[in-house]
Amino acid sequence: RKEVEQDPGPFNVPEGATVAFNCTYSNSASQSFFWYRQDCRKEPKLLMSVYSSGNEDGRFTAQLNRASQYISLLIRDSKLSDSATYLCVVVGYSGGGADGLTFGKGTHLIIQP
Amino acid sequence: DTAVSQTPKYLVTQMGNDKSIKCEQNLGHDTMYWYKQDSKKFLKIMFSYNNKELIINETVPNRFSPKSPDKAHLNLHINSLELGDSAVYFCASSRGGGYTFGSGTRLTVV
């Protein structure tokens, strides 16, 4: 089983719609969770952290379900500029330090006018 | 001021050559990383350095060697380049969970 799994898409969504995608992770000892956004030929950039209590940032809502080991991202009122690849990222800790980021393969989102 | 800068942005070279990619961060972060993104867009960690100490070394070929002259720099040296090394290499740095990536070096081996 892969460490972090995401549906690669692409998700083709009309502008203004709500879209949601999930990610599952295999390491139950994982401590921190993030959603990153990567535009074509650009570096990944942090979109938001994911907390057990759920968190919202404008049109974006992230949720974590530790029992089922999945993370979700919801985008409301989608904009053309939301078109990108969304990377689910998990951080595990072992021994003396962080293991760095473990990335999913990303979900490709295309917002259509 | 660019927070994490890597050079060169593009690198085209022949098989068998040795090349280096440089990375510098001005954020005062404690840990720096190298990630590889292959043609399938999968990002995978290669190395990380924390205060000049290698703390992760994933199963990468020993042709790849990270070199950190100080806390602000982590360079990647690659010997005997192979076609399969073609990818985008991202440098990143972190402190306390916040990660910042460089803009990437697109390496093409011909």
Image (cartoon, helix red, strand yellow):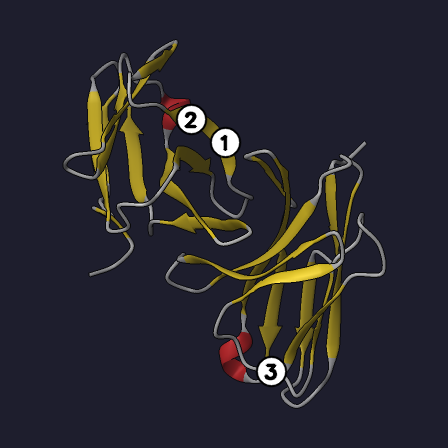
Kindly identify which chain the residue marked by label 2 belongs to: A
Between tags 1 and 3, which lies in front?
Answer: 3
**On-image quarter of the C terminus of chain A:** top left
Q: Position of residue B29 (x, y in %)?
A: 72, 39
Chain bearing tag 3 is B
- Assess whether mark 2 and mark 1 are in contact (beta carbons under 8 angstroms): yes
Residue closest to the far front = A95
The percent position of residue B5, horizontal first and vertical second, equals 74, 46
Q: Quadrant of residue B66?
A: bottom right
Which residue is nearer to you in this view: B1 or B107?
B1
Total number of numbered labels? 3
Inspect the image, locate mark 3, and give the three-letter code of the amino acid beneath it. Asn
Give the labeled residue for mark 3.
B62
Mark 2 vs mark 3, CA separation in Å: 34 Å
Which quadrant does the N terminus of chain A fall into?
Answer: bottom left
Task: Tell me: residue A74, above or below residue B76.
Answer: above
Q: Quadrant of residue B109?
A: bottom right
Q: Are marks 2 and 3 in contact (CB under 8 Å)?
A: no
Q: At x 49% / y 79%, what residue is drawn?
A: B84
Instruction: Measure the C-alpha gap from mark 1 to mark 3.
Output: 31 Å
Q: Could you say which is closer to the camera, residue B87 or residue B94? A: B94
Do the residues marked 1 and 3 share a common chain?
Answer: no
* Disc 1: which residue: A46
Q: Which chain contains the residue that carries disc 1?
A: A
Residue A49's label in the rendered image is 2
Helix, strand or loop at mark 2: strand
Which label number is shown at residue B105?
Answer: none
Q: Residue at x 30, y 34 (%)?
A: A110
- Judge left or right: residue A53 versus residue B62: left
Above or below — where is A69 with respect to B55?
Answer: above
